[in-house]
Image (cartoon, grey):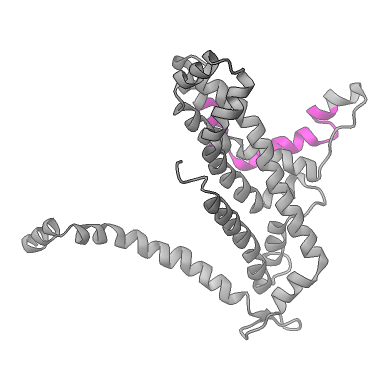
Amino acid sequence: MKTFSVWLYQHRRGRLALLLTAPMLWLVVAYLGSLATMLVSAFWSVDTFTGKLVKQLTFNNFSLLFTNHVYRDIALRSIVVALLVTVIDVLLALPIALFLAKVLPIRFRNFAVVLIVLPLWSSYLVKTYAWRTMFSNSGVLAWALKPLGITPPSYGLLATTLTLAYLWLPYMILPIYAGLERIPDSLLEASGDLGASAGKTYRNIVMPILYPAVIAGSIFTFSLSLGDYIVVKIVGGKTQLFANVIYDNIGTAGNLPFAAAAAIFPIVTVLGYLFFVRRSGALENF
């Protein structure tokens, strides 16, 4: 044991390898292994008469996904919803984070950040069902909008988008808040002393520095929205997103190979988004 300790002390790479072996094995076996299993099973099929799994190579699942216009429409709808959720969260997070980082007194900032994170401590289902109650015919929105002659939004695509935007908003606020904290107040004061308006300072100084933080937050909001199926089940009405196609084929339809093939779509989409972000250089200085 003493000899082994001496060897570890003398070999830095050996210590690093020993430290990383266990988590890397877990990553390979649990994560990459499950993805590999899913990819292989996507080329299988289910016997329509017996319902048994047929472990023979076939491209029928992918052919159906690419040729059926229903799945193409659902895929496009899912991407649009994920992008809308991201845009809404950016528009809401920017003024909130700016107020927290540059306007609110320092002694109140930690408490305000706790309030931002506080919704993450409550149950995901509780928050979603709360929005279901608000979108119901007897909910808060109907009570507030009907006297104004405005038809309140009901269950559907709008309800799904707004609910997802609420759920993932803290994941957008926190990166932007962290980015704003790193901007020295003297830089903003210098811009004002040189005659720049608040809007011009925000556009030409703050936003270029904040761009990596916005992109980092968008990765969370986009990927989480693209893979969510519970919100659609609760407030989506008859709306269906691609994650629901995967869920339905796992449960109701019982077609695991088709579900595995469908699951490759959000993975490829998120990887494509990350590739675009990486090529844009947005995360190099984050």
Q: Position of residue 126 (x, y in %)?
A: 64, 38
What residue occupies the far bottom of the structure in this picture? 56
Q: Residue at x 63, y 69 (%)?
A: 260
Residue span colored magenta: 114-142
Camera-side residue of 73 and 128 = 73
Q: Position of residue 136 (x, y in %)?
A: 81, 36
Quadrant (top left/top right/bottom left/bottom right) for the N terminus: bottom left
Left or right of 13 in this view: 200: right
Q: Residue at x 47, y 66 (%)?
A: 32
Camera-side residue of 237 and 264 = 264
Q: Residue at x 83, y 23 (%)?
A: 144
Q: Does residue 164 appear in this view?
A: no
What residue occupies the far left of the structure in this picture? 2
Q: Does residue 5 appear in this view?
A: yes
Judged by its main secondary structure, the magenta piece is: helix
Q: Residue at x 56, y 21 (%)?
A: 99
